[in-house]
Every structure is written in C-alpha cells, then in structure tokens.
Amino acid sequence: MALLVEPAAGDLYLLRDLIWCGLCAVPLVTVQIRPSGTRYYGCPNRPCPRPLVPAEVTEQRAWHRFSFRYDALAHGVPRDRRQAVLGQVLKRVLVGANTTALAFEWRD
C-alpha cells in the first residue's frame, strides 16, 4: 500500500491548510491510499496517537457546519470553489482525540 502525501493534479482536499491536530497543535497533512484512492488527513508528528482522519466525512461535516452558519454565502457554491470560500471565513478546524470531535475557529 503506497501513500501519496500531495495530490499530483488539482486539490482534492477541501480542508488543506485548515485542519489541525488538536493534540499536537500542528496542521494535518494530506494522505491518499493507493490504489483505492481513499483520502485522509494525518498528523505529521509520528508519536501522535491519532488515527488517520477520513477526509470525505470530515469535509462533509465541515461544509455542513459552514452552511448552517453562513447559509446565504454557502448557497450555490460549486464544489471546486468551496476550499476558497472556507479559507475566507474559517481560521482552522481542530480534530480532537476522537476523529469525530471537531472544533471550528471562525475568522469573525
């Protein structure tokens, strides 16, 4: 099983540079498992006890939280523009000890 840390073409990771390890206080890196293509975020700190964070589910939860908070702004944003929109209003997403425990820090 090979790991690809940075996608070759286009950015497949909605939360790149926005998602942080709440245990180590560092940005998570992108991980893609080959050949399945399954996407994850992972802590670059090797001793960190955190398992890989599933990208798809985490990104859906983040976009849902954004949409709830900024309904008018979120309406009609195409998928390929979501990362730019999130980057304007979101400082970071912290992932707690449990990968489903997300804390959002907004710019406003």
Image (cartoon, grey):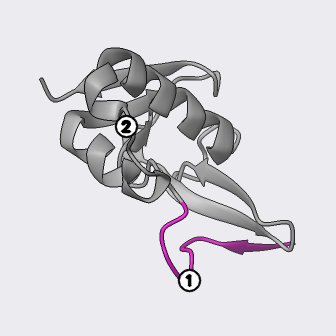
Left or right relative to 72: residue 1: right
Quadrant location of residue 103?
top left
Q: In this view, does 72 lie above or below 36?
A: above
Q: Where does the image place residue 78, in percent across and percent down from the top left?
A: 43, 51
The quadrant of the image that shows the C terminus is: top left
Can you see residue 15? yes
Left or right relative to 64: residue 100: right
The quadrant of the image that shows the N terminus is: bottom right
- Mark number for residue 8? 1
Q: Residue at x 39, y 32 (%)?
A: 93
Q: Answer whether residue 6 is magenta in the image.
A: yes
Q: Is residue 77 above or below residue 29?
A: above
Left or right relative to 3: residue 104: left
User: Residue at the front extreme?
Assistant: 76
Q: In this view, does 6 lie above or below 46?
A: below
Label 2: which residue?
25
Amino acid at pointer 2: Ala
Tell me which segment is drawn in magenta: 1-12
Q: Which residue is drawn at 50% across and 57% down?
A: 29
Can you see residue 54? no
SS class of the residue under badge 1? loop
From the viewer's side, name the closer residue of 42 and 81: 81
Amino acid at pointer 1: Ala
SS class of the residue under badge 2? loop
Q: Where does the image place residue 61, in percent across and percent down from the top left?
A: 56, 27
Real-space Cα separation, disc 1 to disc 2, in angstroms: 27 Å
